Amino acid sequence: MNNREYLRVRIPELTVLYNELPPGSSPPFFLGFGEHKEPAIDREGIVDDPVVSAILESLGKLESKVDRILGYLERQGARKPAYAYQGQVVDISGGGLSFATLSLHPVGAHLELCLMPQVGDPRPIYAVGKICWVEPSSEKSNLKANHVGVRFVEIDEVDRQAIIRLVFHMQRKEKEHRGSEAASKDRVKDTGPLHADPCHKDGVIKE
């Protein structure tokens, strides 16, 4: 499988905060992904009602999110940074992301991730991901950075859908931007020599 297949869209100015999980460790419980025992419930007399099932499922997701917040507050109370590392997202989709970082991490390492979208739904997105590849960054602004590709291995479906909506939102903005640029070029072309292109010696705009 091509590890880059999940990369969908380039996201400007999106920061990812993360921690590298110790080798062999399971995802932390406060993220809501770790295994935990369900509370004992007396199911005698409970009818197999889809409405009740939906409510219980919603309560389970709410408990998961509360665990994340409590874990964050616990670390803040200990006066330790909630996340040790920070990266700049390059590409993202519902299946994973790639980002540039000055830190070096081994392929196969698991990362605890927190994304803070700047557009659309502003709430944090949490996930656990596995590093699929690491290579030198091609960004000219920072040649010392590493380009890291991560595949999500644990993520709530709600958060995955939030990422997909973010991708579609950015794609729509990019399409609108290209459309406005094309319309602007057409207007400049129609005006003729009144708006000559200074980049060409003859002053003629060349398509």
Image (cartoon, grey):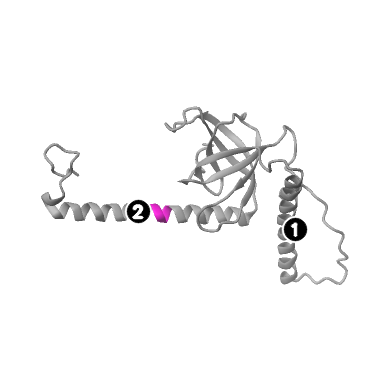
Q: Is residue 64 above or below residue 111?
A: below
Classed neighbour count for the residue bearing mark 1: other residues with Cα under 10 Å, few (<14), some (14–19), many (≥20):
some
Q: Which of 129 and 75 is in front in this view?
A: 75
Magenta range is: 171-175
- Identify the residue at image location x=72%, y=62%: 57
Tag 2 secondary structure: helix
As drawn, is 168 to the left or to the right of 22? left
At label 2, the amino acid type is: His
> CA gap, disc 1 to disc 2?
41 Å
As drawn, is 30 to the left or to the right of 205? right
Q: For the C terminus, which image quadrant? A: top left
At which x and y percent is residue 183? 25, 56
Q: For the N terminus, which image quadrant? A: top right
Q: Are marks 1 and 2 in contact (CB under 8 Å)?
A: no
At which x and y percent is residue 166? 51, 54
Let me know if residue 33 appears in the view: no
At label 1, the amino acid type is: Glu
Corner quadrant of residue 191:
bottom left
What secondary structure predominates along the stretch shown in magenta?
helix
Q: Name the residue under label 1.
A: 63
Q: Name the residue under label 2.
A: 177
Q: Identify the residue at the far front of this view.
A: 79
Corner quadrant of residue 172:
bottom left
- Identify the residue at image location x=75%, y=70%: 52
Label count reads 2
Let me know if residue 100 appears in the view: yes
At which x and y percent is residue 33? 72, 48
Q: In this view, does 14 lie above or below 57?
A: above
Q: Which of 184 and 129 is in front in this view?
A: 184
Dot 1 or dot 2: first in sequence order is 1
